[in-house]
Amino acid sequence: MIPEEPLFAPDSARAMAFAQACPIYKPTALLSVSDDGIQVAVKDESTRFGLGSFKALGGIYAVGQLLLDEVAARTGKRPDMHDMLGDEVRNVATTQTFVCASAGNHGLAVATGAKLFGAQARIHVSSEVPSSFVTRLRACGAQVTISGDTYEQSVAAANQDARDSGASLLADGSWEGYTQSPALVMEGYTVLALELNDSFSQTGDWPSDVYLQAGVGGMAAAVTFIIRRDWPVQPRIVIVEPTASDCLALSAANGELTEAVGPVSNMGRLDCKAASLLSFDTLVRSNVEYQTITDNEASAAVASLDYVGLSTSPSGAAGCAAWQRDRALDKSAGDAPLIVMSEQSIG
């Protein structure tokens, strides 16, 4: 059942202030590339904070906010975020361990946040996760555990780990009774939409269609929320999932969370069979469409982006694949599409 009141109510101004307080922060590029004579706006998240994906906006931010909450619980006073690297926060951080499951990018963000503020991170990944991610996670100081053969099995292992060890679970998915921490992750993602709002406000070239790829749906829902709340020109929004993992589309059709059943997809960061409760709840209130794409369509989109000098993975190119399908079928897409290139190429 869908709750009467929305579950996701982000403080996007707080998220932007946190991002801007980072010395290396700058908005990621909004590019324009030609696709068969149509100019496609591309939000390039492959350079975000040097971590290679939009996920850096969420995990680091959530670690920081949870540490500030812990300091407040112990001292009765919540430090200002500009004091995040001070002794008061660091002394508390050294006692904290953050646990999560990850298909790669979320784990990198959590591990980076933990290392930055002085905490520990333990990341559970499935055997499907590329070894390059495992290497990068360990380089960030995280303890990495291979837990199961699928993302869902690594999620179950992380949840059990947190229960057994008392560590803080920092998942990017959410479910009944577990929404506070993943809401912080999604709140961090709203920065992406705020940057887009600033860019289009300056040019006046608002997109006709926005394609947002989704795994558990955190980024898609966070960006959709800001678009529907703030943008003066409202686009058609398409939520894009692998055909093997269309959990958000199924959930929307059934009016309740519904798991997908399908084979492993080459869109590894999107290959999630269970949607986030927060994402589902946000999207069903937001007038969006759902579209699934095949592995072959995602690979073709990778090649298309590579042709114009943009390097990404099938997951990162999923929005492009959906746009290209719409264009090929002469569907209801307008002449000013926006896609999010959500991650760098995976080596």
Image (spheres, grey):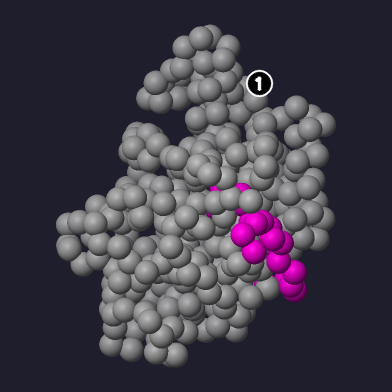
Residue ID at (44%, 57%)? 286
Where residue 170 sits: x, y (%)?
63, 39
Residue ID at (77%, 60%)? 150
Q: Main secondary structure of the magenta part?
A: loop
Q: Is residue 264 above or below residue 51?
A: below
Residue ID at (47%, 55%)? 285
Magenta residue check for 200: no
Question: Which residue is label 1 attached to?
Answer: 95
Where residue 330 sits: x, y (%)?
39, 89
Where residue 232 sits: x, y (%)?
24, 57
Q: How many numbered discs sit on the rendered protein?
A: 1
Residue extent of the magenta highlight: 254-279
Residue ID at (36%, 55%)? 228
Task: Give the amino acid type for the residue marked by disc 1 in the picture.
Answer: Thr
Which residue of the protein is positioned furthest toward the top in this rendering?
Answer: 75
Q: Looking at this view, is 202 or 208 the one in front?
A: 208
Horizontal relation, residue 203 to residue 195: left or right: left
Horizontal relation, residue 174 to residue 14: left or right: right
Quadrant of the image containing the C terminus: bottom right
Q: Looking at this view, is 262 or 38 the one in front?
A: 262
Q: Looking at this view, is 232 or 80 the one in front?
A: 232
Label 1 CA crowd tier, 10 Å (few <14, some 14–19, many 20+): few
Under circle 1, the secondary element is: loop
Q: Is residue 28 visible?
A: no
Q: Is residue 326 above or below residue 268?
A: below
Residue 310's image quarter?
bottom left
Q: Is residue 204 visible?
A: yes
Where residue 41 sits: x, y (%)?
32, 70
